Structure formats: C-alpha cells, structure tokens
Image (cartoon, rainbow, N blue to C red):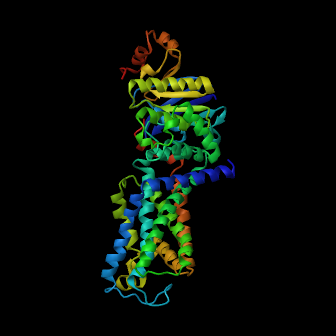
Amino acid sequence: MTIEARQISFQYGRTPVLREVSFTLTSGRFHALLGPNGAGKSTLFGLMTRLLALQTGELLMEGRSLRRQPADAMRQIGVVFQQNALDLDLTVRQNLFYHAALHGMSRKQARMRSDQELERFTLTDRANDPVRLLNGGHRRRVEIARALMHQPKLLLLDEPTVGLDVASRAGLNRHVRTLCEQDNLTVLWATHLIEEVQPEDRVLILHEGKLLADGAGHDICEAEGQPGLAETFHALTGAGQT
Amino acid sequence: MKPAHYWHCFVGIQAREWLRFWQQRTRFFSALVRPLLWLVVFAAGFRAVLGVSIIPPYQTYITYETYIAPGLCGMIVLFNSMQGALSMVYDRELGSMRVLLMSPLPRPFLLVTKLLSMGVVSIGQVYVFLLVARLMDVEPPAWGYLAVLPALLLASLMLGALGLLIATWVKQLENFAGVMNFVIFPMFFLSSALYPLWKMQEASPWLYWICQFNPFTHAVEAIRFSLYLEWNGQAFGITAAVTLVLAAMATAGFRPQRTRILSTGGAA
C-alpha cells in the first residue's frame, strides 16, 4: 500500500507542530521515522489515524483521500500506540476479539485470525492469560498482533519499544521487519533510537515539525558527509543519541 | 460497511463491558451500598418528617421509602453514567478510547454503543437494588420491573451523553470530585428524586422552577411512572429530547477536529 503525504502542516493553537511535511511510503517496505522528542512524530501519527484532523495538506492511502474516504482508509491501517492501549484485566484473546469486533469482524473470523496471529507471535500458550500477567515485551507483541487482526496493509508503530529492555527491543524490531517481507506490509516505525534503524532502511528525519531528510539511510549519510546515521542525525538535528 | 459489521461491533462493545464488569464485580456491589444507605437510613429518618400525599402514579398513601426508590434508581444510573463517561476520556481509559476511535465505523455509532453498553451494566445494578428494596416493602407491580426498562435505558443514555459532553468540553473538570460537586449533587438534589415537586414549590418557587428545568427530574419521573405501569408522556418526551441533543453534542465533540485525546496524552 502506497501512502502519500502532501504538504501537511499542523498547529496546536498558534504553535506550529508540523510544517509542510511531504513524503511517500513505498508498499511492502520498512520506513523509519526518526526524530527527537517533540519533533512532531506523534502528531503525524495522530493525523494518519484520524485522532487529529488534517488542517492543511492531504494524506492519500493507495490514492484514496483520508479526508474524503476515512472509513476505507481506516480499514487498511493497523496502529501500535506509544502508550499501552491494552485492557490489562482482559485476556490476550479477549483483547484481540474486542479489536476484531470494532472492525466489524464476526466471532468466527475473529477466532480464526486470533489463532493465526497468536501462533505467529508465539503467544498461543498465553492466549487465556490476563494481559496484566505479561511482561512488557509480550504486551507489545500482543499489541502488534492486535493491530494486524483485520489484516491492514499499513502498520504504524509509534515508539513501540519504549520501556523495553535491549533484547526485547531488538526482537520486536526484527519481528516487524519479517512482517514486511512475509505480508508485503508497509511499515512506518517512529523512534528516537538510532540503533533500531539499519543503513538500508528508508529513513525520514523529522525535527521541529520539518522533514529534514528522506531517503535510504546510507544515502542520507553520504549526502551529509557523515560516517553513520547517529552522526547524521546529530548533525541535522543538533540532538545527541539517546 | 454492511449492517453485519455494525452488529458485530455492537455485540463486541457490549461483550467487553460485561467482561469488565465481571472483572470489577466487587466495585459493582460496593456501588450498591450508596443507594441502599439512602433507602435504609435516610428514608427511615425522613419518613416521620416528610408526609407524602396521594400523588400520581401512586393510588394510595405510600411510605417515603416507596417514594424515593425510583429516585435512587435514577441516582444509580446518574453516578454510573457520569463516572463511566468521564473515565472514557480520562485516566486509564485513554488508551482504550484510542482503540475505539480507530474503528472504521462512524464515531457517533461507536460512542452511542459504548454509552449504551455502560448503561446496560448500571441497569443490572438498578435491578439488584430493586430486589433488595422489595425486601423493604417497596413493592411495585410485577410488570413494572419490565416496563421501567426503556426509561432506565433512556436515562442512562442521557446521563452518559451529558458526562461525555462535560468531559469533552470542560477542561477544568478533570476529576470526578469536581463533577460530583458541580453536576451530580445539584442534579440529584434539585430534582424530584427525594421530594415531590409540590413540596419544593411550597418551600421556594424559584427552586421549584430549577427542578422543573432539570432533565434529571424528568428522567426520575419517567422511571417512577413506568415502574408503576403509568405512562408519563411529558417526562419521556423531555428525557428523549434532551438525550438526542446531548448525544448529538457529545458525539460532535469527538470529531477529529475537536479531539483532545492526543494532546491530553502528552504527544508532540
């Protein structure tokens, strides 16, 4: 699924948060959205998921306008939010069923899809455990499984590794990359952690609401005359790696 | 989207509310203590002070407990709906609200379904209260228990929509205590829940008019009349009209243009 953002600007009151941001996400690829805290990443996600309304500019999902055909677009999007959005008192499977129902899926479809996703994320034996009993890494996996229940073509992940240890972070990142390859899923992974980005990834660098760079990681480094992404990121944003 | 999608979504939201209720069942029963205290303690103290004459829908002299029972049903719905609606927007519900709004189905449908599902749970609480009240000689006709259902649903929808509206529009009232003092208590005391309005008219004409303008009065009267198998078109009409207006305003508050969810989540 190809996603095109055209000249998107957004402001809270009089404070501009995004300034004329334009980019295209290529179908079936992993895209990293890099930016320090406060860069405007979550606002961009808010606009792409209709939690916020577009003020200026246009977002097109496979050529369909998010503004004019929101339901069509929303059916194609799966989201993993920065903050936990699971119901801790419900079981893993109940959380998945709830999401499926919100997308109009029957109980039979929900059972079939949840079996598939739980197996893929090796969570089958935890299906009937309350989410509260799972560790941070497992909860994140449940959130991704949930986001994929309705078989979206675009997966948005807003700093999905916040609060996870190094091993869980790396595991989750690997997992999502596999999804891109297996399911031809378009992924936009927002982060401020350079180690989650590989040189060959498509990288978008956002800083103070402006898109400073857009291209393959190694191309951006070359253009900036920097040896690696961390140095490039630092040079462009003036921020140290956190 | 096809009708089947709406149906699956409706059932899913209801199911989740019941699952949550089951998880928090101790809270369900502890919330029953409040109206039962009013019925057992407050009513016992006040029955001697307050004489209730024969007024519709009652056919004869009634005890004070019988008079306030419908008002206390309204109280259960009032507290639950407000608390539920506020928690939809604030606190831990923040995440699940985002999940709800990510559905491709229209937001007014999602929000009204959510309010209805919360209403159904608090109606369950009302029925448990009415059963206990029966042990205390509050004995409406048997069919009254069924007839009161639409009034209870309407009341819960109206009060849930009001709670949602308050939570969406009034940024200052971010805690339940504030809403309790400025909305719930005035609504409850300035209504016909605890005393008939003619009593209030004797005491103060302007307080009487405030009670008349309070939609909760009409919700309580709709509950009272239905419970005793009498039709009160005025009470139902006003409650339904207010519900429509509040629901329209509350769902309008959740258009993306007005959504504060992201900003309250501290996003940038």
B114 vs B189, left or right, is right
Determine the image quadrant of residue B263.
Answer: top left
Asked if one can make out residue A109 in the rendered structure from this viewpoint, the answer is yes
Front in this rendered view, residue A172 or B163: A172
Give the percent coordinates (x, y) of residue B130: 45, 73
**Farthest front residue in view:** A125
Determine the image quadrant of residue B134.
Answer: bottom left
A125 vs A241, left or right, is right
Front in this rendered view, residue A6 or B244: B244
Asked if one can make out residue B168 in the rendered structure from this viewpoint, the answer is no
**Farthest right residue in view:** B2
B198 vs B44, left or right, is right
Taking B123 as reference, is A155 above or below it? Answer: above
The image quadrant where one finds the C terminus of chain A is top left
The image quadrant where one finds the N terminus of chain A is top right
Name the residue: 63% across, 33% down.
A61
